[in-house]
Image: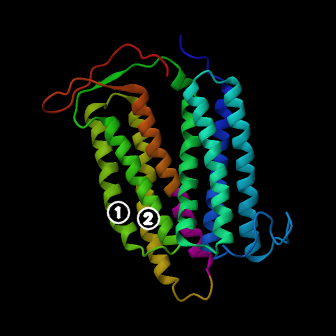
């Protein structure tokens, strides 16, 4: 008997995931506007919870306020899951999300108090991406689709799609780390540009595996279409960002074009990573490992798969 989906939890998880894009954008605005130390203290801002929202304070304190709202949403989600969710691993995932958002807040405070050390700032930016992916995962696994009986497909190819999709997500995570390190001054842009080639190879490879082995599996094809669309746009935006960054080297202050393009690049990077996680989760839900066949991998369809 599959678990009974709780629509309220699923909808709240989806809303939280969407709202999480706001602090990601706000954090990128802080970095792009060089507003990281516009507020020199933490957790208050100039000794108060509501300073004048002017200049860089608007970006920095605004980021803190939005992040606090995300923290509150995560507390509600974790408690709700704990009380209403029957699957133990989902309850643990809810508390993991809460732990990540707390750690994210503490890293944000350390970033300010330690005067923006590149390592801590980069970790702060990276953890935000991992938290977002955790919330997206909760949104997927609490859905009616995930908790309903689904047909299964045997993967007889090598390497398995599960391993390929997992590696794809890992490679994109590394790319987000390199991008965060560049934005926060840990090192130059070259590692980020070089690793983009690895990301491109993994996204293309994952798409090829899905197309060759699971052409008829609509959820997998659909999730890959979204990943390809987001990643393709991100590549174009990355080229534009590089051109804008080069052109802004002698600007006296960050100009609107520089800010808007770099923020969009960061935000779309997070969405691309989340899309790769959705591909991986869809694979986990629908595909099981079969005996490895020699030559092209074939798939065998089964009638249904119990919900996880």
| Image point (69%, 42%), residue name | 74
Residue 177 locus on image (x, y percent): 46, 61
Residue beneath the point at 13% across and 30% down:
294
Looking at the picture, does residue 275 appear above or below residue 106? above
For label 1, the SS is helix
Q: Please tell me which residue is depicted at 52% across the width and 71% down the height of the picture.
A: 183
Q: Are marks 2 and 1 in contact (CB under 8 Å)?
A: yes
Q: Position of residue 241 (x, y in %)?
A: 48, 71
Which of the two residues, 19 or 71, is positioned nearer the viewer here? 71
Q: Main secondary structure of the magenta part?
A: helix
Query: Circle 2 sits in a helix, a strand or a loop, which is it?
Result: helix
Q: Is residue 266 magenta?
A: yes
Residue 291 sits inside the magenta stretch: no
Which residue is nearer to you in this view: 99 or 305?
99
Furthest-left residue in view? 294
Where does the magenta region start and end?
254-268
> Which label was assigned to residue 252?
none
Q: Earlier in the sequence, mark 2 or mark 1?
A: 2
Which residue occupies 52% across, 19% down?
A: 148
């Amino acid at each position: 008997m599959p678990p009974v989906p709780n629509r309220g939890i699923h909808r709240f998880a989806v809303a939280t995931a969407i709202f999480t894009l706001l602090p990601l954008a706000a954090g990128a605005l802080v970095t792009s506007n060089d507003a990281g130390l516009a507020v020199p203290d933490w957790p208050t801002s100039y000794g108060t919870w509501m300073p004048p929202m002017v200049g860089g304070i608007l970006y920095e304190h605004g980021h803190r306020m939005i992040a606090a709202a995300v923290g509150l949403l995560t507390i509600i989600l974790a408690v709700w899951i704990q009380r209403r969710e029957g699957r133990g691993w989902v309850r643990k995932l809810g508390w993991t999300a809460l732990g990540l958002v707390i750690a994210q807040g503490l890293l944000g405070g350390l970033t300010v108090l330690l005067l923006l050390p590149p390592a801590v700032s980069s970790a702060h930016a990276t953890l935000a991406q991992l938290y977002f992916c955790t919330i997206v995962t909760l949104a997927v696994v609490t859905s009616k689709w995930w908790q309903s009986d689904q047909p299964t497909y045997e993967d007889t190819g090598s390497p398995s799609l599960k391993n390929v999709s997992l590696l794809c997500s890992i490679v994109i995570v590394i790319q987000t780390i390199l991008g965060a390190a560049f934005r926060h001054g840990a090192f130059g842009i070259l590692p980020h540009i070089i690793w983009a080639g690895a990301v491109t190879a993994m996204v293309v490879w994952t798409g090829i595996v899905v197309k060759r082995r699971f052409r008829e599996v609509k959820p997998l094809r659909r999730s890959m279409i979204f990943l390809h669309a987001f990643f393709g746009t991100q590549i174009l935006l990355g080229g534009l960002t590089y051109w804008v960054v080069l052109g802004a080297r002698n600007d006296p202050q960050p100009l609107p074009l520089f800010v808007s393009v770099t923020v969009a690049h960061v935000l779309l990077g997070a969405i691309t990573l989340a899309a790769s996680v959705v591909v991986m989760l869809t694979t986990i839900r629908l595909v099981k490992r079969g005996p490895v066949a020699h030559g092209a991998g074939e798939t065998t369809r089964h009638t249904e798969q119990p919900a996880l």
